[in-house]
Amino acid sequence: MQRKFKCEIWGGVAVLIALCTPAIAQLPSNSLPVFITDQRVLVGRYHYEEKSDNFKIDVHLNADNTAPYRITTGPADSDFIKAEGFWTVDGGVIHIHNRPSLARLDPIGSPTLDPKVAISVTATNADGTPAEGLGVTWPNASGLYAMGDGRHVNRAAEKVPRTRVSIMRLADRTVLAMFDFDPRTANSFRFTYHPSDVEPFDIPAIALDPRAQTLEVEVGTASAKLRRVAD
């Protein structure tokens, strides 16, 4: 009988790769986390393996909070991704992050005045397609506004006071551009977005025992139990 596979996305420093793991490993988790009071317990190397498919995950949680990882996805020497990330702990959850390269937003021309809006912010990629994964906010705004289709608009009736506007990457709240907004002078702003090689990611994990001998890691909708191994 042919086995079914389900693909999840794990980011890397230079590329995004699709990791295909057996459906049997993708069952929803009902594991209960163990709260680790001393983060030093977490330091070590963790490994997960599906031998039949040569799928492996190796993660090192180092004492300096760096987190090198290697993911093998097939039998060929090139079927792997290796990168240097870092790890943090928030409550009972361990977070493994990557280190994407810099991203930037370049203004397009001078801001203009549009009487039909209170404020308009548009971001496109270098090829003209709408930018994704950005948000707009300012002090005393109702929140962080995700830029659907690369644009955020407040209608003219939705007054926006003189303020300082920030445009940020939603994945990690990195501020990519800031500008002073004065509704009397200009209210429409356009930018070109130059994203990083990969989007930032945050892979949550939980310890399943007080000595952190097993970590359960989420990858998209998947989960895998990584066992501690000797260095």
Image: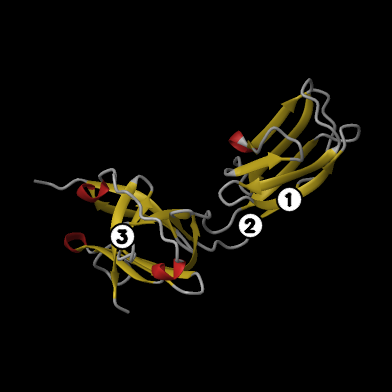
Which residue is located at x 39 percent, y 51 percent? 9
Residue 228 vs residue 104, the one in the foreground: 228
**Which residue ends up furthest to the top in the rendered image?**
157
Q: Using the rendered view, name the quadrant where residue 69 is placed.
A: bottom left
As drawn, 32 above or below 50: above
Badge 3 local density, few (<14 within 10 Å), some, or many (20+)? Answer: some
State the SS at label 1: strand
Residue 45 image point, x, y percent: 35, 72
26 left or right, relative to 159: left
Q: CA distance from mark 2 to mark 1?
A: 10 Å
Residue on which disc 2 sits? 103
Residue on which disc 1 sits? 177
* Mark linked to residue 209: 3
As drawn, 6 above or below 119: below
What is the three-letter code of the residue carrying label 2?
A: Ala
Residue 62 image point, x, y percent: 45, 73
Circle nearer the N terminus (2, 1): 2
